[in-house]
Amino acid sequence: MFGNVVPFPPSGLVIALQYYAGDEGAAMRVARLIADLEPARRDDVLLAFCRRHDTPQSRLSWDTQLHCGFKFGTMAIQSERKGEGFPAGPNGLWSGTMDALARAWRSGKLPVSSVFCCEPDGVPLRRDWIGVLKAEHARTLRAGKRVTGPWVEHPIPHFNGTFISHLSLWWDRPSLHETPAEQAWDLFHAHVLASEGQATGAIKNIYGAVDWTPGALAALARETAWLTSTKDTSAIAWAERTLVERPGTLGPEEVTPAPRGPMSCSCPDPYRCKKSACPCRCSLCAGAGRRVTVKG
């Protein structure tokens, strides 16, 4: 009769950034931004680099993990669940990520109890985004729920897959462990997740949005901490040049935005690369000569 008791207060958060070879560059860009937003190291958050079963750990991901390790504890997870394409690939990656983290938490090896699952198409809109999401999730747990996320009405009412959940959810809801390969996991498990969830506006899903303007993002940031489902680099470019405090400045420094391009990067260290010598022509590296060096 105690199976659905939620421990409170929550003991930390793991940010599970899920990716595969096709969007690894975009994922590493998000990871570096997450780290660069923090003014000092914090021990209440872990950053997990969660890759698909067929994605090896690359030099880029290793270097990015080292960069982020100045601000967070980090870990690398390779999903043991198979699946390629859509939706089988995301299905296997999410379930493999949850399975690995929940096992580590139950065995006492993971010192945090909740996970924020996100993908490379997401971006923080505020420097204090982690604190905002943790506070929202604390409200959820106080209400006796275990999922905090954006509520979406189409194609059916459900929580978008970018959400925070307490890791006990994985063990108490075994139906979540399997998803048909032809159905997206957040839609297939919509009923179970809805019964466990509390909606928040702090995570916003605006599917397929492109060409974000600085004014629109600044306005959205007043009520939203994390924007998901972006389909170009306009939002993350804004966050990089607006939210990151540059060395030697008193606050954010405006720089010329890099031109938009594919959400992929093969440069081993795009923040420090020299434009003239960089073989990668993605939007981040194409504008590297105009960017201020960000030190870990």
Image: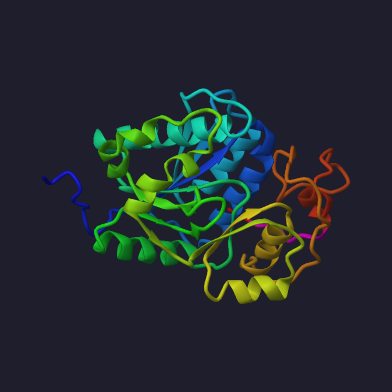
- Above or below residue 86? Residue 54 is above
Query: As drawn, which residue projects farthest toward the right?
Result: 276
- Above or below residue 73? Residue 95 is above
**Residue drawn where x is 48% and y is 59% of the image:** 150
Where's residue 169, x and y in %?
30, 43
Name the dominant secondary structure of the magenta segment.
loop
Query: As drawn, which residue projects farthest toward the left?
Result: 1
Magenta range is 290-294
Where's residue 18, x and y in %?
54, 40
- Above or below residue 45? Residue 58 is above
**Total labels drawn:** 0
Q: Is residue 150 left or right of residue 8?
A: right
Q: Pick whichever, 8 or 143, lies toward us.
A: 143
Residue 42 is covered by the magenta coloring: no
Q: Quadrant of residue 268?
A: top right
Where's residue 99, x and y in %?
38, 32
Residue 104 visible, this orientation? no
**Residue drawn where x is 41% and y is 52% of the image:** 164
Residue 292 is covered by the magenta coloring: yes
Image quarter in which the N terminus is found: top left
**Residue drawn where x is 48% and y is 44% of the image:** 186
Judging from the image, the colouring scheme is rainbow
Q: Is residue 158 left or right of residue 110?
A: right
Q: Pick whichever, 136 or 243, lies toward us.
A: 136
Residue 272 visible, this orientation? yes
Where's residue 75, x and y in %?
45, 38
